[in-house]
Image (cartoon, rainbow, N blue to C red):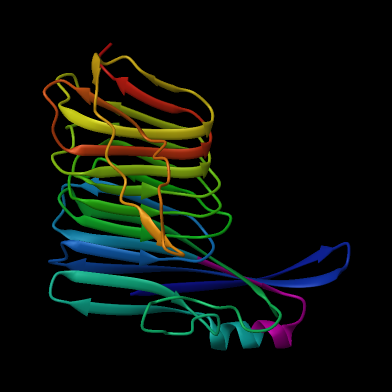
């Protein structure tokens, strides 16, 4: 494990700010499932030919005074858990309630700012569970394992990937290019962002898609799927039915369900070989 630190002083309009940057490298042999639970900062994962997970971490702390910086160094850390081939890294601090449902809460005013940026190399078949929240992007390149990728304020890009899973963000676009078409159910979601997903020729899938403010486009040949019957909700002795706004189409011979859902953005389902 290698750690280096640098203390910098920078003048802002409102006064002096203390900044501390440090870098760290961690290596995990025999890992085949990786969880990164970040709060602020980017996550970039690239497939490699090596047999271990290699993690480079840049940590940035900012505070208005040295006392606040000292507090930040005491309170902010990178927690690690290892169980067999599973590795979890979680940015930890007083904002974590450590509840049974893994939720997090910020308590009181922020006395400092913190950021973690991850650059990671993994064996191609590593399963990925990545999440971050603020001022962030997530990039995955060349992996073949299943995935669960989540962001809040930032985009997600996946290049030349295989596997199945879920990709979701709130404020940002989703762009995915598959090297091999998904073999299992896979979902793509955003609230404010376009879903731009490219598949290989010969895609066989049942597609459900929805957008409120945008168009839905594909250059694959499709046939309509029947609407799925909605189960009614009991309310004051009455049956209430909600309209399912999902549009369903079959590509090829049908197969795994692919779900595309956004509120403000387009749905683009592309044949990358056209």
Across and down, in percent, residue 228 comes to: 27, 38
State left or right for residue 204 relative to residue 242.
left
Between 233 and 190, the one nearer to me in the picture = 233
Give how far across and how far down residue 25 sits, in percent: 36, 67
Q: Splitting the image into 4 quarters, where does residue 113 fall?
A: bottom right
Residue shown at 41% from the left, 49% from the top: 168
Q: Quadrant of the C terminus?
A: top left
**What is the x, y in percent for residue 63?**
71, 75
The answer to whether any part of residue 178 appears in the image is: no
- The residue closer to the viewer here, 236 or 43, is 236
- Is residue 130 shown in magenta? no
Q: Is residue 217 left or right of 259 when viewed as pictured?
A: right
Residue 90 in sight from this viewpoint: yes
Q: Position of residue 102 (x, y in %)?
A: 39, 77
Looking at the rendering, which quadrant does residue 94 occupy?
A: bottom right
Q: Residue at x 48, y 28 (%)?
A: 266
Which residue corresponds to the image point at 28% horizontal and 79% vertical from the top-left? 81
Reply above or below: 24 against 46: below
**Residue 274 sits above or below residue 41 on the image:** above
The single residue placed furthest to the top in the displayed view is 274
Q: Nearer the viewer, residue 183 or 161?
A: 183
Please report the bounds of the magenta region as a residue range: 59-69
Q: Is residue 99 left or right of residue 41?
A: left
What residue sits 25% from the left and 63% below the top?
34
* Position of the N terminus by quadrant: bottom left
Q: How many marks?
A: 0
Q: Quadrant of residue 68?
A: bottom right
* In the image, residue 70 above or below residue 166: below
């Amino acid at each position: 494990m290698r750690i280096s630190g640098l203390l910098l002083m920078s003048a802002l309009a409102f006064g002096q700010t203390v900044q501390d940057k440090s870098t760290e490298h961690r290596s995990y042999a025999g890992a085949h499932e990786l969880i990164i639970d970040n709060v602020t900062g980017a996550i970039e994962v690239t497939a490699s030919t090596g047999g271990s997970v290699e993690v480079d971490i840049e940590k940035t702390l900012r505070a208005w005074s040295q006392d606040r910086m000292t507090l930040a160094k005491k309170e902010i850390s990178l927690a690690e858990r290892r169980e067999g081939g599973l590795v979890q890294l979680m940015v930890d601090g007083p904002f974590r309630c450590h509840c049974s449902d893994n939720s997090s809460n910020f308590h009181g005013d922020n006395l400092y700012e913190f950021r973690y940026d991850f650059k990671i190399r993994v064996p191609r078949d590593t399963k990925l569970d990545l999440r971050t929240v603020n001022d962030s992007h997530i990039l995955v390149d060349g992996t073949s394992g299943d995935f669960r990728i989540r962001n809040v304020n930032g985009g997600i890009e996946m290049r030349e990937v295989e596997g199945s899973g879920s990709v979701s963000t709130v404020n940002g676009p989703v762009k995915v290019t598959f090297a091999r078409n998904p073999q299992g159910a896979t979902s793509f979601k955003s609230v404010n962002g376009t879903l731009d997903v490219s598949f290989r020729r010969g895609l066989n899938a049942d597609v459900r898609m929805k957008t409120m403010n945008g168009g839905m486009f594909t250059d694959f040949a499709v046939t309509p799927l029947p609407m799925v019957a909605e189960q009614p909700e009991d309310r004051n002795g009455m049956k209430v039915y909600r309209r399912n706004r999902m549009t369903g189409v079959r590509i090829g011979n049908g197969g795994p369900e692919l779900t595309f859902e956004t509120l403000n953005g387009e749905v683009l389902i592309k044949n990358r070989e056209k």
